[in-house]
Amino acid sequence: MTAYEELLSKYKELKLFSTAGGILYWDMQTYMPPGAVMLRSEQLGVLTKIAHRMLVDPEIGKLLDLAEKDKDALDEVGRRNIHLYRKGYDEQTKLPEKLVGEIAKQSAIADEAWKKAKDSNDWKSFEPELQKSVDLAIERAEILKEVKGTSTVYDTLIDDYEPKMSADEISRVFSELRDGLVPLAEKYSEMSTKVDTSFLGKEIPIDIQRKIAVDVATTVGYDTTSETAGGRIDEVEHPFTVGYYDDVRITVKYHVDNFASALFAILHEAGHGLYEQNLNQEWKYQPLGEAASAGIHESESRFLENMIGRSPEFWKFYFPRLNELTGNAFSGIQMETVTKAANLVKPSKIRIEADEVTYSLHIIIRFEIERDLFSGKIEVSELPQVWNQKYEEYLGVKIETDTEGVLQDTHWGSGLYGYFPSYALGNIYDGMWFEQMNKDMPNWVGNLAKGEIIPAIDWHKKNIHVRSNLHDPGDLAKLVTGKSLTAKPFLEYLKAKYSKIFG
Amino acid sequence: MTAYEELLSKYKELKLFSTAGGILYWDMQTYMPPGAVMLRSEQLGVLTKIAHRMLVDPEIGKLLDLAEKDKDALDEVGRRNIHLYRKGYDEQTKLPEKLVGEIAKQSAIADEAWKKAKDSNDWKSFEPELQKSVDLAIERAEILKEVKGTSTVYDTLIDDYEPKMSADEISRVFSELRDGLVPLAEKYSEMSTKVDTSFLGKEIPIDIQRKIAVDVATTVGYDTTSETAGGRIDEVEHPFTVGYYDDVRITVKYHVDNFASALFAILHEAGHGLYEQNLNQEWKYQPLGEAASAGIHESESRFLENMIGRSPEFWKFYFPRLNELTGNAFSGIQMETVTKAANLVKPSKIRIEADEVTYSLHIIIRFEIERDLFSGKIEVSELPQVWNQKYEEYLGVKIETDTEGVLQDTHWGSGLYGYFPSYALGNIYDGMWFEQMNKDMPNWVGNLAKGEIIPAIDWHKKNIHVRSNLHDPGDLAKLVTGKSLTAKPFLEYLKAKYSKIFG
């Protein structure tokens, strides 16, 4: 075996091991008996520890040195594998174990403090724990800067989720995005108030919603029923997708009086799921047999949820089918009402309740705060005030309590910094895909009305999924669309859709 | 940390790791998408490999040497932990990796050959693969003899499942057992033909059977519903129990026209499950925090299935409840009919369909064949002929094809030799428990009729479960009952029950 082959053989072990951990996580959220909580947390702890040991094995360092000497003999795939392997190895080995332990411990403490603070609207009790968390994240980022080749702390944090993306570049596209979204939000939120949305609250029994979920998942190609299916749908408190290639599971939460919530959630998670299932089979168990980034992942889920799932064409096809599945619960409702209801705009305080137009504004606020926090422009103690001011400015909503403001998200308490931008980057990538799809397949949107959804998925499979992690996300977008990162196509897509729906 | 403490800390990791593998196995049998078969088999393969590496770590050998020097400073628990640890370590390290690999490979080949041979009633195609399997088992046993301190190959194989038990001792109790069972089988199979069992075939919808399963499990203390439950019931092709302390899951297969099959299966698996859940909490993650043997495990499942589940007293309590749960599907059926139907005797060709009286005869046949095969008295090629002869002699049934004869069980094809005796040893231990329970709690059987089942379970918890693996199974039986292994109590239990039911 060459050093390169030996590295791949070790990586396969590591990957099989970590994906086994994914199933244990899924089990914990779905079917695990409640009495097993402590046991499971210890099991997951040991798996993480052993996976870490496998990754920082000095033997891997030696093999990487050897393989890098022979790098020119490798093709693009081989060189990318070595690059990703090296990056992961260096990141894991450069961090002192003590710091890794402190971060894990502080994340647990801060997360607990966040839950209490949110419940009791008590920012002050959370502030010192968040400060410690932020300080540790900075300490970690200072060490990783060299490995990642980043120049600032915040760029280093972003690189964890969106490799090679920078705060400067995100600032540029987010400012473009914000300038376009603010007037759109104003215009269509006004028009949205006139839509009769009462049918959205109609009670649809959970059993029927389960059938709808399988049907809509199948419609977009996420297979849970055939003899070779690699997917499942299960019910959880907070939906997620987990898995690898041949075993990728999505989850959902049903609400009896809000069928649309589960329907869009299924589309969203199926978007994540299809990406994982369609990764390049030749690169299974290799470093590049993975998604390109969190932002690209989000582009795939949002493409299905929003660009397909909220399009008038999709509803033209799917509403009669939905009506049939519900035993004609929606007979007599106009198609115009349906598409307007699926595309309401309503500036709100809560990110996870936001619509397609205002969602990115919630993200831009979080990004700007993170950016300014990690560059030292603002202090942790100023977060509530800055938060409320930006919500007023960008969304026109007045935040009354920190619970519905700066304390609403779990991310910062859990130590996730630099993650938020991925959500809106997903929308931006989607705009770019949308524009390119229109060039490559001019009738694809119109064909959705005939139920022809798979060709759109296949475009994503060919252009994004099978490319897996061969390219950093910015390079991937450029390769697929010929363009550098730009928010314009997403804004144009929104403008066209909304003017079509609301006139 | 002392060497002993360090050993325990390493064992905890190993145990958390292997129990995580148990959940992956459960998932494979229950909810895994069908397309994931290959991925899962690779995941389980890597987990096994890493667990093996963890166990044969030379550091453990050094720590064992150190801890053994200080053994006198340890109490009974500590010494037992060291003994079990040493035994496992030596067994794993003394076997050449090459041989372990060959056995794994040959087991897969022989299992595949067995499936085909059974399907096509073609013993000859299986024979050479079985011969190779047997030869490898002998090679392995010759190496392990020294570690285990056993004197023959077959004793070594038995020791894998029933530590310190010997073929001689099993021959002694099985011959006692056979002599008692043969006349019982003759007498009651004759009387069984007159019982009207038509109600057993009544169609009970699976949804109702699921409710019965939860109800009967709860009745015997296997909790699947409370906020601290550590159990679950799921549906599989071949029922099994898997888990550890706080997360022990049982499985079942429902047949719409045979409700009794699932009901007894639930009791059987709940017996296994309660044993695992009731292991001594203080010994969790330690070598002795495990069941004492396969035979003791089987005694716990058979106690619930047969001694409780087929007793007239249990049915007096449970039949009205069953009738209610089924919407009075069984109204008008006499209690006498019910208890006779639950205790039919019918000598048959197939082990897994056997009743409480004839089941052990199936096992004795397999034991005698294994014993004579591994002592060289018979050859692999003679197995079908010996099999058929013994079935005629012990059970009075004529085997027409090898498919319904020597090819019926999966064990030998999978390389499991020395395992069969555990099943009948379970019955023998049960007889001993039954006799002792009657001394300790004279009214316990009568009280079953009032639904007081938990006191019987508690007796098992106190006398067997919490003792975990502190004693080898023979010593445990002696400690609990004051007697050496004997089949008499089991035979007396059967005689008393059958004469009570059939008169």
Image (cartoon, coloured by chain):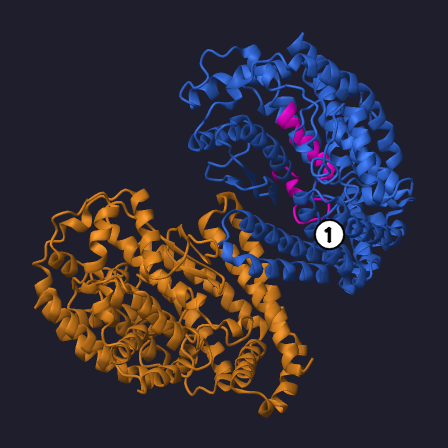
Chain colours: A orange, B blue
Q: Nearer the viewer, residue B372 or B473?
A: B372
> Which residue lies most toward the top here?
B503
Instruction: Describe residue B21's horizontal placement relative to residue A266 as left or right.
Output: right
Q: Is residue A328 magenta?
A: no
**Circle 1 is placed at which residue position?**
B110
One can see residue A486 in this view? yes
Name the quadrant of the N terminus of chain A. Answer: bottom right
Q: Nearer the viewer, residue A371 or B379?
A: B379
- Residue B196, position as x, y percentages in the image: 56, 14
- Residue B183, position as x, y percentages in the image: 78, 16
Instruction: Describe residue A387's horizontal placement relative to residue A226 as left or right.
Output: left
Q: What residue range appears in magenta?
A: B277-306
Eyeballing the image, is A200 above or below B203?
below
Q: Which kind of residue does numbered mark 1 sit on?
A: Ala
Q: Is residue B304 magenta?
A: yes
Eyeballing the image, is A8 above or below B61?
below
One can see residue B244 in this view? no
- Name the secondary structure under disc 1: helix
Residue at 51 percent across and 27 percent down: it is B259
Q: Nearer the viewer, residue A297 or B481?
A: A297
Instruction: Describe residue A492's horizontal placement relative to residue A453 as left or right.
Output: left
Label 1 Cα crowd, 10 Å radius (few <14 / some 14-19 / many 20+): many
Examine the image and state in which quarter residue B476 appears.
top right
| Total numbered labels | 1
- Residue B126, position as x, y percentages in the image: 75, 48
Residue at 77 percent across and 20 percent down: it is B181
- Residue B461, position as x, y percentages in the image: 65, 31
Examine the image and state in which quarter residue A364 appears.
bottom left
Name the quadrant of the C terminus of chain A. Answer: bottom left
